[in-house]
Image (tube, rainbow, N blue to C red):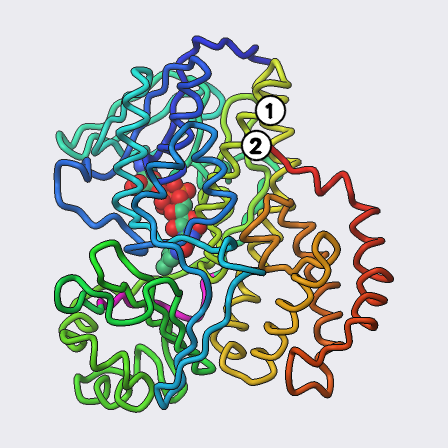
Amino acid sequence: MPEIDRKEAVTVVGAGLVGSLLAMYLARRGYTVEVLERRPDMRREVIDAGRSINLAISTRGLHALRQVGLEAEALKHAIPMRGRMIHSAKGELTYQPYGKDDSQHINSLSRAWLNKFLMTEAEGTGRVRIRFKQRVTHADFQTGALMVHDEATGETRREEGRVLFGTDGSGSAVRQELDRVPGFHASNEQLGHGYKELTIPAGLGGAFQMEKHALHIWPRGTYMLIALPNEDGSFTCTLFLPWKGGAVSFETLDTPARLEAFFEEQFPDAKKMIPDLVDAFFSRPTGSMVTVKCAPWRVGGQALVLGDAAHAIVPFFGQGMNCGFEDCVVLDGLLDKRGQWEDVFADFERLRKTNADAIADMAVENFIEMRDSTGSPRFLLEKAVEKVLLNAFPGEFVSRYTMVSFSRVPYRLAYEVGAIAGGIVSELSEGLTRAEDVNLERAGQLIRGRLVPFMKEHADGFRTQG
Ligand SMILES: Cc1cc2nc3c(=O)[nH]c(=O)nc-3n(C[C@H](O)[C@H](O)[C@H](O)COP(=O)(O)OP(=O)(O)OC[C@H]3O[C@@H](n4cnc5c(N)ncnc54)[C@H](O)[C@@H]3O)c2cc1C
């Protein structure tokens, strides 16, 4: 078993969000880190940052940045989103706060800015070298050798074995190599929906054309539109539609006239604010979303996959990156406790796998909630009741959303506690028309009878993971 040598050189495959942050964590501990990145350097060449233009960072991701001194700078570029703004087909607006008060909010951040920032900060440690246009094509876990294709010269070379971290995203080449490891299994579930990004530009003088501090949602059953604010006053909208079939899908919206009629009927307020709707819709790529579950995540003390490479999830809880950043925190904590890579990797998988599976399942469930329920009166009532309980029973009542987004409680526990809390809210909402009328005495009995004992029983789990 390789002993951990703090001056050792290690290789990270992929300088995306997780790979860049991981490099920073490893460098801080004294490792020399070589990062191999397939794409050109986005700080020097104009390239698509990939996936979404902006994303939501919340407590777990911010905690990971704080540990390496990067949170304050990131927050300077972030826009707090304090709740959901629901847009009806008639253009009526309903606002639902995310937490018990405004201190509980998520933050919209530019993906490209964050990735560039993390790369620069990692390199700034003096121990990280990011090599661009270097695509890993093959990893031999017997010898530890890597085959790397230089996209600039067209040559392929062999790199000698070092400890390897695969942070090469949902289509991970490193994970594919794990397929050769006996007992490895992976499931790769494509969502039946794709997504298209559209832009609501800033208004006059850089003004936001809608409420700035909200995540906007147009829930419409089998499809939905969402929008997150950007620093420059614009919003990035994401339209989620089934790939094909049904009355509305990417397949059926095949002409400008159909697209415009669809937006006019379903998203009339958004349509007025997207001047280049037709051009953008037909010229921009349609993204796909996948849930990847696999095991094992490691080969002895030689290789480990993290981030989307180990556990890609659909984006509806805004947690993919947050979860990957939390991976870095957990791995870092284990480096304090364990003296051998093999033990670090085994503990890492044991701690993270169940939590990654839990957030993967919650993300799929949240998709159904966002597109189907967020607009329904019952959902709005339950969210309002939840807020009353959060304020009336601090420290006793918790909701799934607040645990996932505003705490570092392990995702698995958030899933289980959230199910109990959700059942209580549902029961108390029965027959109510206004959240203010919720029976607090009954609420107290249910919370102290069901939720508090469960939380006490799992008190250890509530002590966080990193
Ligand atoms: C539409 C959408 C919205 C999202 N919104 C959110 C959100 O609001 N909040 C949130 O927390 N998460 C969100 N996510 C999830 C988030 O994007 C991912 O979880 C995050 O990007 C994972 O980071 P990563 O570094 O593991 O992978 P990636 O960001 O995919 O980075 C992988 C890197 O590896 C490189 N690479 C790939 N293959 C190779 C190879 N063979 N050799 C060398 N380099 C390679 C790639 O070029 C890339 O730079 C969203 C995802 C989508 C699709």
The image quadrant that residue 118 belongs to is: top left
Find numbered disc 1 in the image and state the secondary structure of the residue it sits on: helix
In the image, which residues are magenta? 190-199
Name the residue type under label 1: Leu
> Residue 12, relative to residue 440: is it above or below?
above
Q: Which residue is drawn at 50% across and 9% down?
A: 5
Name the residue type under label 2: Val
* Some atom of ligand 1 lies within 8 Å of the CB belonging to the residue at label 1: no
Q: Residue at x 25, y 23 (%)?
A: 157
Left-right relation of 414 to 134: right
Left-right relation of 160 to 385: left
Disc on res. 330: 2
Residue 70 shows up from this direction: yes
> Residue 451, relative to residue 146: is it above or below?
below
Find numbered disc 2 in the image and state the secondary structure of the residue it sits on: helix
- Determine whether label 2 and label 1 are within 8 Å by CB: yes
> Residue 247, relative to residue 402: is it above or below?
below
Q: How crowded is mark 1: few (under 14 residues within 10 Å), some or many (20 or more)?
A: some
Residue 436 placement (x, y as % from top left): 66, 78
Left-right relation of 77 to 372: left
Q: Which residue is drawn at 24% across and 90% down?
A: 261
The image quadrant that residue 373 belongs to is: bottom right
| Residue situated in front as seen by the camera: 162 or 283 | 283
Residue 150 placement (x, y as % from top left): 20, 30
Identify the image quadrant of the N terminus: top right
Q: Residues within 10 Å of mark 2 (few under 14, many from 20)?
A: some
* Some atom of ligand 1 lies within 8 Å of the CB belonging to the residue at label 2: no
Residue 171 shows up from this direction: no
Identify the image quadrant of the C terminus: top right
Q: Residue at x 63, y 59 (%)?
A: 400
Which residue position is annotated with label 1?
334
